[in-house]
Structure formats: C-alpha cells, structure tokens
Image (spheres, rainbow, N blue to C red):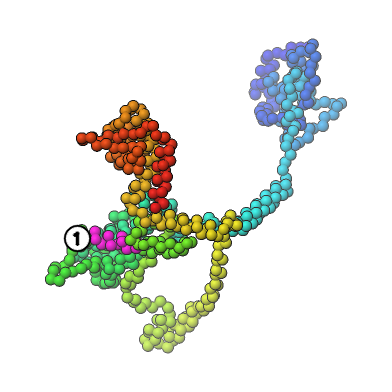
Amino acid sequence: MAQRRLTDFFARRRPGVSTTLPRAKPAWRTPSPAKSAACAAAPGPGSSRKRARPPAEPTRDERVPPARKRLRLPADAVSGPSSPPAPVSPEHPSPQSKETKKAARSAGGRPCLAAQENKVPSKVTVSELKSCLQRAQELGARVQELKASAQKDAGEPSAPEDEGRLEGPCGEQMPAYQRFHALAQPGPPGLVLPYKYQVLAEMFRSMDTIVGMLYNRSETVTFAKVKQGVQDMMRKRFEERNVGQIKTVYPGSYHFRQERFVPTFKDGIKRSDYQLTIEPLLDQQAGSAAPQLTASRLLQRRQVFSQNLVARVREHHRAFLASLNPPMEVPEDQLTRWHPRFNVDGVPDIEPAELPQPPAVEKLTTAQEVLARARSLMSPRMEKALSDLAQCTAEPRSPRSPSLAQPATPPAAPPSALKGVSQALLERIRAKEAQKQLAQMTRRPEQEQRLQRLERLPELARVLRGVFVSERKPALTMEVACARMVGSYRAAMSPGEMEKHLQLLSELLPDWLSLHRIRTDTYVKLDKAADLAGVMEQLARLARAEETL
C-alpha cells in the first residue's frame, strides 16, 4: 500500500491548483435519532480501539475530505426527527454506511444515546385541547352552582363584596384613607368628623381668610379671586359646588349676588359679564363704623361652622341608632363618641344650595326662533325658505319610555346559624349589647382615661412586685419605684404617669400596696407574701366591672 505524500495533500487543498469549485463548509447539524446507528456490540477483550486504515488508497481524481471531517455524516444524509432512514441496498453499500459502521466500531463500549433519543413524546392534537377546555368550563360552572346553593341555604346575599363600598361624586370608589379616616385619628375617641366634612371645614377657613382680606380693603370679592386663593392655600380644587355646600351648612355666613361691570383686570373676563360676588354677613352695632372681619370674628365663624357639621353628623347617627334592634336613644348632651358600628366616613355628602345665577339672556339658536323674531323684516321668499329649513331640521321627539318600577328588596332572612335559638335569649343578648354600647357612647374622657389605667394595672402589679424582690427592701421611695417601673414596663411612660398608676393601685388594693407620707418623701410599701395571681385576678375583675358601668 503506497504511502500518501504531504505535497499531494497541499496540492489538493490549494484553491488555485484544483479546477473544481471549493467545497462549502457542511452545516453543523445534529443527526437524527432514527438515522443514527444502533448500539454496537461490545468488543472482545482482544479488540483494539485503534482506528482502522482505509482499505485502498484513493486516486488523485477523488475528493478526499479532511481527516477531522471523515466520520461526520454529509448534509444530505441528515434529516429531521420524523424522517425515516434512507433504504440501503445490502448488495451495494454506500460509503456513508461504511463510515457509520466504522464510527460505531470505534466507539467501543461507550453507551449509545440513540435509543433514548428515539423516545419522542407524542404531539397533543387540537381536539384534545378543546375537550380539556370544555371540561374545565363545565367544572367552573359546577363550582359556581355549588357556591350559589350554599349562599342560598345560609341566607346570605349573592354579592356581599358590593356592600359597604363608598363611591365618590363621579362614581369611582373612594380611597382607603378617606373611607377609614375616622379610625386613624390620634388621641382618645370622640365626635370625629368624616374626611369630606373636615375638608369642607378647611375650605371654609381658607375662604373666610381670603374674603376677610379683600373685604377689609373695601374690594369687591368675586368668586374668581376667592377660588384662586383657596386653591393656592389648600392645593385642592375649589368650585361653586363647594360654595353651595358651605351655604347649606352655614346659611348666615355670606350674601351672594350676580353683578356686572366689576373690575377684574383680566383678559379672559369682560366687564359686561356677570360675576358671582361674595359679601360676609357681620353684625353691625348701631352708631358704629363699618364692621371689619377681624381674627376673633374669623375664629367665631369657624367654630359655628364646625358645630353645624357635627350637628349634621348627629342627625345621621340618631337615624342609625333608631334603625338598630333594639333601637337606642342617647341624649345629645351625654353623647361623647359615635356608635362602634356607625360608619362615620360613610355619611352622605352635603347637598349644595342654589347660588344666584346670571340672568338668562335670550339667544337665537334655531331657525324657528330667527323666523319668529325677524318675520316682519323679511321678504316673502326668504320667509318661505326659512320655514322650509325649520321643518327639515326639526326632529320628532321620541316619547319617553315609562320607568320600570324596581322590585322592592325582600327583607333579609335570619341566618341559619341562629336557627333553633330561643328568641328570648337573643333579645336579652341584644339588650345587654345595647346597654354596653350606650355606656361606651356616653363615657366621659376622664372615665376613659381611668379605664385605660385599670387595664394596665395587672401587668404593673407584676412589674412592681419584681422591683421589690430585686431591691430586697421592705419600702421604696416613690421616685425610685417609678423609675424602676418605667424602665421595666413594655410601653413608654413618664414617671408622673406611672405615679398616678401607683396611686390608683393603692386606692383599689390598700392591703397589698400602701403609700406613706414621711416628711417630704412618699414611701411605697408592698406585701410580698400575698399571692400575685390572686391580686392580678382581682384587678382584672375590677376593670371589667368598671367598664360595664
């Protein structure tokens, strides 16, 4: 077998020597699992992994591929995963099949991955997807039917999520900081105004300030001037609707008129246009000069406006108490807070009062009005043309459809959870709850503060006993005891407030804790032999009894 020369190899690879076109680089493709060869049998122990040489030397006319590309399949032999292998005649095997067999023999004992790649998952047809989608829709409809039947059995409304939603003037849902404004107020609970009422009170304060400045300078107060000033102060929109609400709440605050020829010094408003003027109503004493809107008057008017707003909320609260079961009635002078279930921010908006409107100026807008006005000034031909035009442009009005009467909502059925419970027992529970809520609404701020201290006493008693045990003294001064307890209590509290708690504790349990005044100091003495659990239980019982009063 003749040996290949190195010069022949370079002669074949040189583009200028060969007359044939240069061969294109084969595409890098992954051979198909169906086309790949089966796993070769494991070679015997005497077999070698050395690559065998070709049986014969190729001639110069044949195109020999490079050494690193000999074992690769040509591009035309590679097919997709679904293409079947090309049939090969056993009598005349192709050179590609020979190379494939050589590659299989050279692999030796390596695992063949062709068997694993042949396992291709089956394709999901469109009909199967449609059947799955139809099945899911049927299950969803079944779930909805079960939910509807369960709600019907429980006596609940079908759409409970729509209840209790507050909507703004344009129909959109109000944000949470407005719907729950009353619940986020700092300080002790009281007669808190709704958020929209507080905004209106702030608008009245800003408007009164602007009107006072202009009125004291003897300047004509117009709505355009007040609107700009209020919006600059509050960073909120201020419209005539808000002025109408202010007039509804405080009718005796301003006098409104429509006037012409008011100097505005603006290009957008003509002097001949009507403008809404505002004049504050002030009490003028006989024989005195023109009254001024001073700071004391501003404060007084602001207090009157706030009282009127509270009176309006009281009316809604009174209607809410009358709708309870059983109905409740609280004297107005004893009411210190709203009912716990009364939605303060859910009260309706204040209806704006009517403001003076500019006088109606007759304007000709249709051909019929023009014809009626200038009938005597036209010729017969023009009059006929205008009458024809008026008949053509007139549209027949469609009769209004009678409004359908909405069916009355049936009364809510009692929940099934209370089925079988005695009606007398329910009445007693409701009466007791109403009595507790009545006591809560008529509670004074001093009583509320005392209740808060009573709730802290059981834990403070435990902390105080720990202080005496750690100090190992029969008595401590008030300053030392308060300082130790302030450092040990979980909440922040001043020494003065802690001293008030100790005084209340000594009033309720004089046998367990006693205060002794010696010269300029007050000493605290504690009975450490007493049962602490019994003391805490007694304090909790006193707090519950005080709360029900």
Magenta-drawn stretch contains 304: yes
Q: Is residue 167 visible?
A: yes
Magenta-drawn stretch contains 456: no
Per the rendered image, the range of residues in magenta is: 299-311
Q: What quarter of the picture does the N terminus occupy?
A: top right
Q: Nearer the viewer, residue 60 or 44?
A: 44
Residue wearing tag 1: 294
- Residue closest to the far right: 91
Q: Which residue corresponds to the image point at 34% horizontal and 30% vertical from the top-left?
A: 468
Residue 168 point in image, percent of width and height: 43, 59
Q: Is residue 101 above or below residue 379?
A: above
Main structural element of the magenta stretch: helix, strand or loop? helix
Residue 479 point in image, percent of width and height: 27, 34
Q: Nearer the viewer, residue 213 or 62?
A: 213
Horizontally, residue 311 falls left or right of residue 157, namely left
Occupied quadrant, residue 212: bottom left
Residue 221 point in image, percent of width and height: 24, 65
Q: Which residue corresponds to the image point at 77% horizontal and 26% vertical from the top-left?
A: 37
Horizontally, residue 209 falls left or right of residue 244, namely left
